[in-house]
Amino acid sequence: MFKLFTKKKPEHNSENQGRGILVFENTTEVIRAENALKARGWEIRVMGPPPNIRSGCDLVIEFPLIEELSIRRSLTEVNIEPIQIVPVNSVLLEPVSLLHEKDYGKYLMVRAANMKITVERDTKLIVNVSGGGCPDVPYLAGQMVNKHLHNAPQPRDVGYTLCAYALQIAYDRMVEIC
């Protein structure tokens, strides 16, 4: 008897299946790959690279290793090629979480990579945006600080750098927990 298999969303579960990471030449490629894979329904995570495989790009994509061939095919269809695909088979190859949260009582801060957003808990007012080294960080801060979390522009709508991308991750997490 034959079974028909259909593509379904792979489930990310590090306990019962291996993981791999896609390494790219630059951040632009990571963002393009993330958008392409998510648009095709893949469950992936953008993470910081483990120290021993950094290539100049500060981001990698973690994916279920069992889906490597299908993910590779999906990327090839949109002309994106990772420079390396690495199975996570050791603690030294673990990707690093980009997100960190800090509770300051009256304020809550979320950091993604080097970008931070701080919100006053009661009012949901953004009181600080800082970090990174990209030229648009002061502009991002100027657009967001002193605005209500839900009325501020999203970083992806006003910035185009790695810092804006990281701030978007922090902003999304802040919206989620507030």
Image: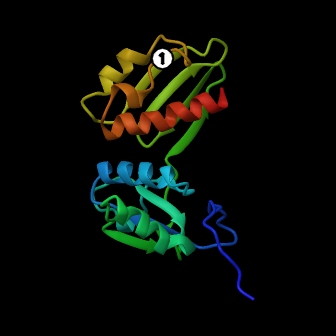
Q: Is residue 29 left or right of residue 19?
A: left
Task: Single out the residue that lies furthest toward the bottom.
Answer: 1
Q: How is the image coloured?
A: rainbow
Count of picture labels: 1
Does any portion of residue 31 appear in the rendered image? yes
89 w.r.t. 149: above or below: below
- Which of 42/94 is in front? 42
Where residue 87 appears, as percent x and y from the top left, is 48, 75
Where residue 45 appears, as percent x and y from the top left, is 52, 54
Quarter occupied by residue 19? bottom right
Q: Residue at x 59, y 73 (%)?
A: 18
Where residue 168 appears, as percent x and y from the top left, is 45, 34
Q: Quadrant of the C terminus?
A: top right
Crowding at dot 1, Cα within 10 Å, few <14 / some 14-19 / many 20+, comes out as some
Does any portion of residue 87 appear in the rendered image? no
**Three-letter amino acid code of the residue under disc 1:** Ala
Q: Residue at x 31, y 65 (%)?
A: 81
Q: Is residue 5 left or right of residue 61?
A: right
Quarter occupied by residue 15? bottom right
Q: Residue at x 42, y 59 (%)?
A: 49
Task: Single out the residue that lies furthest toward the right.
Answer: 1
Residue that label 1 marks: 152
96 w.r.t. 84: above or below: above
Q: Quadrant of the N terminus?
A: bottom right
Element type at mark 1 = loop
Where residue 17 appears, as percent x and y from the top left, is 64, 72
